Amino acid sequence: MSEREPTLRDALAPQPHILVVEDDGEMRHLIARHLRDNGFTVTPARDGREMREVLRTPAIAIDLILLDVMLPGASGVELLKELRASSRIPVVFLTARAEEMDRVLGLEFGADDYVVKPFGRRELVARLRAVLRRTGAAPEAQSAPAAPVGELTFDGWALSLGRRELTAPDGSLVDLSGAEFDLLMAFLAHPHRVLSREELLETARRRIGDLFDRSIDVLVSRLRRKIEPLEGSPPLIKTVRGAGYVFVAEVGHR
């Protein structure tokens, strides 16, 4: 792989970053939690559209994709074929026992391994780590990462990845807790996309512990008070009733 600028992964966590593409919400949540418990950073996606959106986001660097074969819309095999036209990101398939032909096609199109459902949690972690070692994406196979550089900008604000500092439009620094920084990064990585409480909580979980999903409401409220300080000013974070939150400002990178 070519040399890249440090990104969100470098700024927030040294762990390998796994993109979990699984349309079953309960399964997706369980896999994400188990992988985080074993030292991985995880970004969830429900289908090919969300997978493409994550991969197009400059602020996110994915080390491995855990890809379910049976997805709504484009199948895992179709998505893998599409991905291999432009990327060598390692891919591990999630398949059912009856999907032997899909496993064969996946390997032919460039999948690095597959895990058959139902699978043991230890087996899943072991297979992912083996693929990461084999492809050179495991931490022990990497040289020490350079300090993250650059800024993410929105509505006159600037968030420094290297210094982990938020600068207001008037040039003043705004103090952010670790959880607030992680939450803001999640919004900036997915502007104009509705993020559920589950997705946001998974992003900030290592900062706030294993709490209720409603605890994310408190964290969002705190962040709003810091980036929406003027009463009557247009909101940057909108609540979508019954679904979650959406960051509505345009995000730039410099």
Image (cartoon, rainbow, N blue to C red):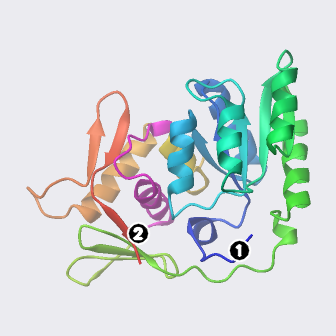
Which residue of the protein is positioned furthest toward the top in this rendering?
98
Mark 2 or mark 1: which is in front? 1
For badge 1, the amino acid type reads Ser
Look at 57% across and 53% down and name the residue there.
55
The kind of secondary structure element at disc 2 is loop
The mark found on residue 176 in the picture is 2
In the rendered image of this protein, does residue 107 appear above or below residue 62? above
**Magenta segment, prevailing SS (helix, strand or loop):** helix
Position of residue 213 measured from the top left corner of the image (x, y, whole percent): 48, 37
Position of residue 69 measured from the top left corner of the image (x, y, whole percent): 72, 28
The mark found on residue 2 in the picture is 1
Q: Crowding near pointer 2: few (<14 within 10 Å), some, many (20+)?
A: some
The mark found on residue 57 in the picture is none
Residue 102 magenta: no
| 102 horizontally vs 220: left or right | right
Most foreground residue, 209 or 19: 19
